[in-house]
Amino acid sequence: MGSFEFEGRSVTFRPGDTVASALYRHGVRTFSRSLKYHRRRGLYCGTGDCPNCSMTVDGQPAVRTCTVRCAEGMRVERAGGWPNAERDLLHVTDRLHRVMPVGFYYKTFVRPRFAWAVAERVIRRAAGLGALPPTASAARKVVRHVHVDTLVIGAGLAGLEATREAAASGSVLVCDEGLAARSVAPGSAPDPIEELRTAVASLEHVTLLDEATALGVYEWLHVPLARAGELVHVYPSRVVVATGATEEHGVFPGNDLPGVMLGRAAAALAGPHGVRPGDRAVVVVRTEEGVQHLQTLIDAGVEVVATAVSPALVQRVPEGAGEIVAGGDVHEARGGSSLRSVVLRREGLGKRFECDLLVLSLGLVPRDGLARMALPGEDVTVVGDAALGVGIAEPGGLDGMVCMCEDVSMHDLEQAWDEGFRNAEILKRYTTTTMGPCQGAMCGRALSCFAASRDATPAPSPVAPRTTARPPARPVTLETLAAGVHEIVDRRTSLNELHVAAGARLDRSGGWLRPFSYGDWREEYRAVRERVSLMDVGTLGKFAIAGPGAGDLVDRLFPCRIDDLEPGRTRYVLTLDDAGYAMDDGLLSRVGAEEWFLTTTSGGAGRADARLRNLADRLGLDAHVLDRTAQWGAINVAGPLARDLLERLADDSIDAASVPYPGFADLSVAGVPCRAIRTGFVGELAFELHHPRRRGPELWAALADAGRDWDLMPHGLDALELLRLEKGHVYIGQDTMPDDTPAKLGMPWAVDMSKRWFVGKRALERMGELPMARRHVGLEFSGGPRATADLRGEPLLVEGQVVGRITSAERSIVLDRPIGLGWIRAVDGGFPDRLRTGSGATASVVTTPFYDPDGGRMRG
Amino acid sequence: MALSIPCDLCGHRPFTEFAFGGEWRELDASDTEEEFAREYLPDNPEGPQRERWFHAMGCRTWTTVTRDTRTNEIG
Amino acid sequence: MAELRTDLPQVLAILGSSDVCDRVEAPAGSALLRVAPNEAMLVGTDDADGVRADVPGAALVEAVSDAWTSFVLEGPDASEAFARVSELLLPEAGWLQGDVAAAAAKVLVEAGTITILVPANLAAHVEERIRADAAEVLTR
């Protein structure tokens, strides 16, 4: 016993109640309003297959209340309807049925043009199944991966039998979207199924998962199961689908009135839940279980005034079933806000019965969507009712709701057929039948039968053509699908803790967590230009390339001359792709006769590794790649006092001869073995100290300590942005376009076309015959915004036409004027040298570097 | 999840462990016309396609497979 | 339940042709992982000089311990904890390599203990993932 809140009222529930049964007992008859026409909908299937009982539960919309157990303190409310579901003024749209035929949104509000924008907004607000909660859910969904021999989906009679059989030869996981072994309606099944459940649960290697919804059967065999707090990925060798069948949806005028129910829903209410579904009932019995449902209703005290029964079952009809109409059909159901009478028809004659309940047990339709998702050749079998065929039958009445999710009537299907949409798949897409929450559970058969019966060509088989089944089999929240998907993976250097302790602002860059600034980036900049500073560049891609074929590999990968690089020397290299476009840049050092060391940009490391291996493989070279990106850290010591600082800590000589520019030397700094590479990225004297990762903190601390009397401070990515910009150095990806050749970048010196072959050479030859359409330029500005950085991203114009873009911009501190980089298109065969920016400033093309053009400061 | 790639060393592994290297292409071309076709006019067949995959999450070696682009069957 | 412990392993990388790698033998107390046709890894030793002497013709033999961090799962629920961060199907004993918490990892299984080697620059991320996703089965 307990209670929950329903639209401001308190509703009591009994043990075993679903939210729907408790609400029904409370007197609720309108459970929802339909999507398009706001028609009242009542309880219908009782098994979680139709959309009628959907309500918002605890803030989550579109919850099928007939499958949800009551919990104390739940908050339940109906969705749809304005101002509310009970008194819905938008019901007037139902009268406009003629004006809003199927596909009306393709044909109406076309002119005037603004009409659709307005209409769309109104329609969107009027339709829908509820509002999404705007905030993210706090509970985190856990992900589990399970490997089993057999997965059985559905723990009813057939599923549990299959489980017992499969357990003899391997591990089994059996799941059910509800509670295992709960029969869908009262009948003779309960005892055998309970015995079976107990027997199965005690078997070894059998796992039973309740309330686990299979979302789909994917290739390789992979079935994700959605549960309350977790997503379980199951990888079975074989799958057995035992999801049973739904009762057939009846199509006739008035079939969606509250008071019209399928047999299982009525019997579940009358039997286990102890709620009389109605006072006066008309019952249609065409199945064995229909007979049982009828008995349950009679036992519950429902006055059955008439029973339409198929001739084969006439003998089985019990006492108290009212007037027996053998071979009768439902002609029409009538009523206003709920059912008031039913017209039964037999052999052209009809008879009207006053009633408030119509119970339909018309047949069984297999719930086999999951099975139909399997590809040929996969080990997926279907057992039990889910394996029933769907025969072609006469289509339903002349009218009636076919698709209750999407408000598609028989009339709508006829109209679509007349318009030329003449097979099930096309009808589905045009009318949206089967595309709602039920995914065809209710309407799929009617659609298929309609298409088959109208089709002039004789059907090759007596089975109705089914539309394609696709996952998810049941509605699933995005939160569930996102479980376990970790898109953000941050790499860190061994100096990360030091940066945090120093108060750095850390952020993501190129797949790493990096310090952007430790306080005032301009102070950091000055430390580099005027004194000495440290930067953590451990994020750089680093590769050892060794073996007899190593020289060949680097010679063919990079466009520049390689064979004249002596041991101890370094060269700036561009990496081109097959099409001749610059993908990455870095430094290549020759370590020995058959050993090279390559550094790449932080973001390009992964691709560089793949590229090196691919080329070695394709060329059949005896060249081997060791990825040192994680193994080594790197600290850039930069500034005019860099050498002075290192001299305090190095055992070996660091003069220009020992560590030349461009070149490197292996030496020891503060007792830590380092490869010191001379670099010029920031335009000052600089040594990139590559060292064993674990000794990074020790090295950093020693350097910081030794530089204390020079007021050494570290610099981050913010300072680096201006430092490199003043030298005119491009950032691949920021300043470059995906189709920039070395020539366009102003780096023809990075290519030696006299080489026999390198990656991209043929493409460069081809493009060399074409006029250059775009080039990179250095820029200086006047009359611009106060913050030069605001110019970044602005277009460059000549006589009002956009001919380029500014890719980097900042006010140079050392030169005290605004500078930038960008690209411009050729105009009338030449490149303009004076342009206007989008904000009206003047931009002049200048040569780069802006600062220290001879490079004397970094070459010392 | 869906497609699995047979890596020589590691066996059949889900495609999510790999980086896709595209349709197999010759490394070089004899003239600029052929170069253009090689670069910009791949076969893109509806059927068996020879292609390259890199086992990024595993052994980090490249493998060449023939995959039917209609069925994802390999071999 | 299961316990998670972090370790700094000793690791050696041997790069060379297939034939050369075929000849690598694991010194006592270390495990040999043939991670690629042209690459072998020794976990549990960093004696590069010793191994280099035993494998003439190798293109590169180097101690790469700094590149790796290992996470050790022990206890009856070790494989359950592992199943929360990886879809790899583990053998009873042996090793394999693949995706663990979005890192390219090597996993060694021996007598109920699962050792996961991940690149050191992803260690912080992987530890965070294991502790969050397997919280239910891990002891503090």
Image (tube, rainbow, N blue to C red):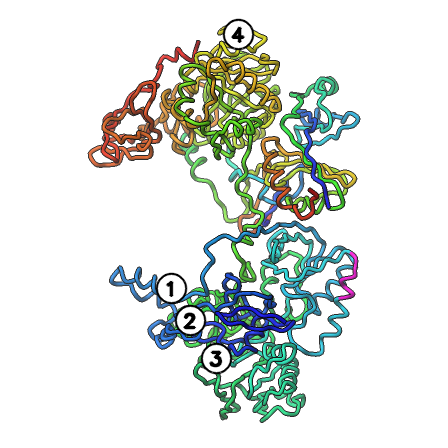
Q: Residue at x 74, y 25 (%)?
A: C23
Badge 2 element: loop
Q: Which residue is mark 2?
A: A84
Q: Are there few (<14), some (14-19), or many (20+) residues within 10 Å of tag 1? A: few
Residue A396 visible in the displayed image: yes
Q: Nearer the viewer, mark 3 or mark 2?
A: 2
> Does label 1 or label 2 sit earlier along the sequence?
2
Which mark identifies residue A459?
none
Q: Quadrant of residue A248?
A: bottom right
User: With respect to residue A164, does B73 lie above or below?
Assistant: above
The residue positioned farthest toward the left in the image shown: A799
Query: How far apart are the alpha carbons under marks 1 and 2?
Result: 13 Å
Question: In the image, which residues are magenta?
Answer: A198-204
Query: How far apart are the alpha carbons under marks 3 and 2?
Result: 18 Å
> Does label 4 or label 2 sit earlier along the sequence?
2
The image position of residue A481, as x and y in percent, is 55, 53
Residue type at mark 1 is Arg
Q: Are marks 1 and 3 on the same chain?
A: yes
Q: Residue at x 23, y 28 (%)?
A: A783
